[in-house]
Image (cartoon, rainbow, N blue to C red):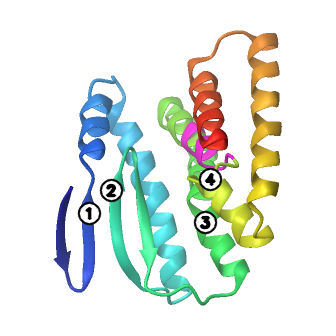
Amino acid sequence: MIEFKLKNILFQFNFLFFTVFLLLLMFKHSFYIFSAILIHEIAHLITMSFWGVKIKNFSFIGAGIILTPTDDFRPKYQDFLIAISGCFMNFFIAIVFANINETFALCNLYLGLLNIMPSRNLDGGTAILKIFNSLIFLRILSFLMIFILIIYILIAGFNIFLCIITYFLIIDTLL
């Protein structure tokens, strides 16, 4: 892991982040994928700054970024809105660009859908935990989502995006 501090904010780069970054560069539309990720994270930052939340830590892991606030003493609705802001920005961008640039719109749509999933490591799971404060409820939702995804894949046919999401949810739910 590479770490450095800049203006009292710790930046951490996990080596998996660089691996995923290099793998994404192999895709034809990697610029759109990186742009969607950047838009997603900027939405979180804007929402955090709106509520006056200071950042303690930026952790670059896998294909995403974890923003750690300096304190945890906020109303639950603020944490909920911070958690879902990235997904909703991706959905908004997908709608705006649907007739302008379909590829960019789809990258934003898929990123928003992925992150809204009820996994404790994604925004959807974080939002659910902030509101209901129940890991059991989150796991029940995860199993329900896995069941829905598997049924959909069996009916609609193979879709690599849905298969990856289903696999991720199964692993995350069982751990």
Badge 2: few (under 14), some or many (20 or more) residues near its Cα, within 10 Å?
Answer: many
Query: Is residue 49 left or right of 138 when viewed as pictured?
Result: left
Q: Is the Cβ of the residue at disc 2 closer than 8 Å to that at disc 1? A: yes
Q: How many angstroms separate mark 1 from mark 3 (CA)?
A: 20 Å
Span colored in magenta: 110-117
Q: Quadrant of the N terminus?
A: bottom left
Name which residue type carries label 3: Ala
Tag 4's secondary structure? helix
Query: Is residue 102 left or right of 5 when viewed as pictured?
Result: right
- Nearer the observer: mark 1 or 3; the answer is 1
Residue where numbered disc 1 is placed: 12
For residue 114: magenta? yes
For residue 54: magenta? no
Q: How many angstroms separate mark 2 from mark 4 (CA)?
A: 24 Å
The residue that appears at 24% across and 42% down in the rendered structure is 18
Residue where numbered disc 4 is placed: 92
Name which residue type carries label 4: Phe
